[in-house]
Amino acid sequence: MGFIKKNLLKVIEWKDESKNTVVYRFPVEDRYEIMTGSTLVVRESQVALFVHKGKVADVFEPGTYKLSTENLPFITKILSLPTGFESPIKAEVYYVNTKQFVGQKWGTQNPIAMRDKDFGMVRLRGYGIYSYRVSDPKTFMNEVFGTNNVYTCDDVANHIRPLIMQSISDTIGESNISLLDLASNYKEFSETVLSNSQKEFESIGLKLEKIIIENLSLPDEVEKALDERSKLGIMGDKMGTYTQYQAASALRDAAKNPNGNNMAGLGVGLGAAGAIGGLFGTNLSAAQDTPRAKTKTCIKCKTDIPEKAKHCPECGAAQNPTCPKCGEMHSARAKFCPNCGEKIAPQKKVCECGEELKPTAKFCPNCGKKCTK
């Protein structure tokens, strides 16, 4: 009786209390034996594999089963029991967790090299999360976990993380997207990686459900270059502004010069600071003293042109004159302002080439063009 109580299983089940167990082998200490009539319980998001002599004999989906010759046809055939499966059998039961394992982390151990049209060859680092599930338990057992007692998410990650990183590297390298546009394409990258990785995962009985790229970071030197470019963009693309900025940066670096502790270093530092300060002051005063020419907007192409220009230097359109009293625009032939009624002096007739013409002229004496106005 003691031998029977110890070796004959009545209920086979697995209550999963963990969050990261993918495969669990039912305890078979001292080679427990399964009798016909025993109850097998398979809960939702579980699959039970019966393994006999190292081979998968039966696969049970969620449900409760009374083990008999009807429920174990493959084992019955393997054992060839003439007694109708009345004696106990020696088999192993593996529970495979088929739920989706979410929040799994990935990250670049080594930088991803890519060629950028603006910065040349650069290296990226990135990280994010992914999720997967077991889609084919039998294939997963044969290809990955074998006969391990317990197989966890960490064990799976060691196997599939290189596949994910390979796909991410290929996707980024083949995209030819500028570094400045990477952040706006994270979703597209994720979808491409998900699509390209499915065949690799199916071959080992897994399905990659989702992958998210949270960040792709640039090297420090590239980030500094971007910061410098941003500063210059705010200042405006002017040589004087750039010189002022460089002079201010040089003053800051000179102040940090460790040689300033001795008199020689102090003299050199003061001399450099004086020269740079003079350059800074000269550029600053020049920028302040130079008056800006007054401009107006072309009535046709809307380009800023000199205020006194009669024709646009960009599109050549004649500019309508304005009333000397109220500033209202009027046609070249107007005798009175349509806004205030001020009498308008006759306008000089001007050819498109800029030559002043007599009121009765029909052709330009400079370019020979026919006068249309």
Image (cartoon, rainbow, N blue to C red):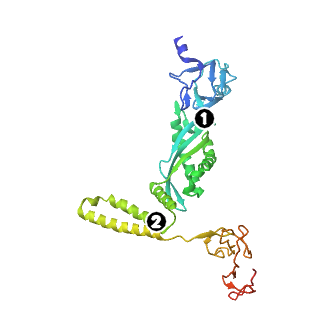
Quarter of image, res 338: bottom right
Report helix, strand or loop for mark 1: loop
Residue 321: give x, y in percent of width and height: 68, 73
Report helix, strand or loop for mark 2: helix
Please state which amino acid type lies under the numbered disc 1: Gln
Of residue 343 and residue 147, the one placed in the foreground of this image is 343
Return the disc, 2 or 1, that comes first in the chain's sequence. 1
Please state which amino acid type lies under the numbered disc 2: Tyr
Which residue lies most toward the top here? 1
Question: Taking 24 as reference, is 197 above or below it?
Answer: below
Residue named by callout 1: 100
Of residue 110 and residue 82, the one placed in the foreground of this image is 110
The answer to whether residue 203 of the structure is visible from this angle is: no
Which residue lies most toward the left here? 263
Quarter of the picture containing the N terminus is top right
Q: Which mark is residue 242?
A: 2
Query: Gap between marks 2 and 1, in whole Å?
Result: 55 Å
Question: Taking 64 as reference, is 228 above or below it?
Answer: below
Of residue 299 and residue 53, the one placed in the foreground of this image is 299
Residue 307: give x, y in percent of width and height: 61, 72
Residue 126: give x, y in percent of width and height: 51, 48
| Residue in the picture at 54% in, 17% down | 7
Q: Nearer the viewer, mark 2 or mark 1?
A: 2
Dots 2 and 1: beta carbons under 8 Å? no
Residue 160 in the figure: left or right of residue 81 = left
Quarter of the picture containing the C terminus is bottom right
Q: Residues within 10 Å of mark 2 (few under 14, many from 20)?
A: some
Quarter of image, res 61: top right
Q: Residues within 10 Å of mark 1 (few under 14, many from 20)?
A: some
Of residue 373 and residue 89, the one placed in the foreground of this image is 373
Residue 68: give x, y in percent of width and height: 67, 20
